């Protein structure tokens, strides 16, 4: 028996199953908030434990971090347009903006990997100090989430190409949009409390 469809709602909310799945994903994001809050708290305790190793002033390259920030925040904007095109029932527009979002995300990951390589060459590794251990775990966890988001979105693109825009594929697209915006918000906190605070302290 097919699920009852309420066409008065936006495509991703038209079935009860979709609404429950989206609610479940909001709950999952709540757990993710707890995870990142724990990592931020750990970093806050250890961010001055340099153990004679490099400090933020020694290794942070704020210009590169600004490029990463611009890439990720721009990807949040293009992700928003992706959902807008989805609600216009424009599959081509949805795919175009979603692919652009993923390219920006991939650019962010490339820049972050380059940043980490620079730190290692400067003698800043996870084993160097408690500060660097907490730094790499926090940023590495965020970077892993972005990488997983890219892979997840690629699978959704494949489904959209095979099945078209349906309540199910719309729900999956909407959920990946929520996930992507969440990662952008986490990055704003990282940029503020790790990089900016580290440079001015």
Image: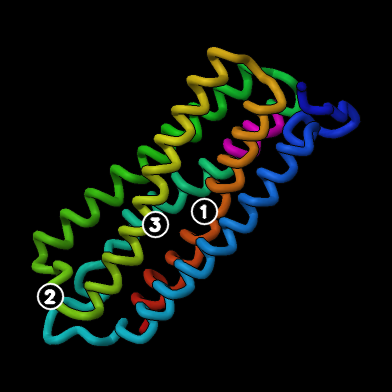
Question: Which numbered disc, 2 or 3, marks the residue that appears first in the sequence?
Answer: 2
Q: Secondary structure at mark 1?
A: helix
Residue plotted at (11% across, 65% down): 122
Q: Secondary structure at mark 2?
A: loop
Question: Which numbered disc, 3 or 1, marks the residue that appears first in the sequence?
Answer: 3
Q: Secondary structure at mark 3?
A: helix
Residue at numbered disc 2: 128
Q: CA distance from mark 2 to mark 1?
A: 29 Å
Residue plotted at (20% across, 73% down): 58
Q: CA distance from mark 3 to mark 1?
A: 10 Å
Residue 113, position in %: x, y?
24, 49
Residue at numbered disc 3: 142
196 is higher (above) or lower (below) than 150: below
Q: CA distance from mark 2 to mark 3?
A: 21 Å
Coloration mode: rainbow
Query: For residue 184, which numbered disc appears in the image?
Result: 1
Q: Nearer the viewer, mark 3 or mark 1?
A: 3
Within 10 Å of disc 1 (Cα), the crowding (few <14, some 14-19, many 20+) is some
Query: Splitting the image into 4 quarters, where does residue 139 fall?
Result: bottom left
Image side of residue 129 versus residue 25, left or right = left
Q: Which residues are magenta?
A: 78-85
Question: Which numbered disc, 2 or 1, marks the residue that appears first in the sequence?
Answer: 2
Query: For residue 69, which numbered disc appears in the image?
Result: none
Residue plotted at (44% across, 28% down): 154
Q: Do callouts 2 and 3 mark residues in contact (Cβ within 8 Å)?
A: no
14 is higher (above) or lower (below) than 117: above
């Amino acid at each position: 028996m097919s699920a009852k469809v309420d066409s008065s709602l936006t495509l991703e909310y038209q079935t009860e199953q979709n609404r429950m799945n989206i609610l479940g994903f909001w709950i999952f994001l709540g757990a993710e908030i707890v995870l990142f809050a724990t990592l931020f708290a750990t970093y806050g305790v250890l961010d001055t434990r340099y153990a004679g190793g490099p400090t933020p002033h020694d290794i942070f390259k704020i210009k590169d971090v600004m490029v990463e920030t611009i890439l990720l925040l721009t990807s949040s904007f293009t992700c928003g347009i992706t959902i807008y095109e989805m609600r216009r029932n424009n599959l081509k527009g949805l795919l175009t903006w979603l692919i652009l979002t993923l390219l920006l995300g991939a650019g962010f990951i490339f820049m972050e990997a380059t940043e980490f390589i620079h730190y290692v060459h400067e003698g800043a590794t996870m084993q160097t100090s408690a500060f660097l251990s907490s730094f790499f775990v926090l940023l590495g966890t965020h970077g892993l989430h972005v990488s997983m988001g890219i892979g997840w979105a690629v699978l959704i693109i494949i489904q959209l190409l095979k099945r078209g825009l349906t309540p199910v594929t719309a729900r999956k697209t909407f959920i990946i949009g929520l996930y992507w915006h969440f990662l952008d918000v986490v990055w704003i906190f990282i940029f503020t409390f790790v990089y900016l605070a580290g440079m001015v302290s």
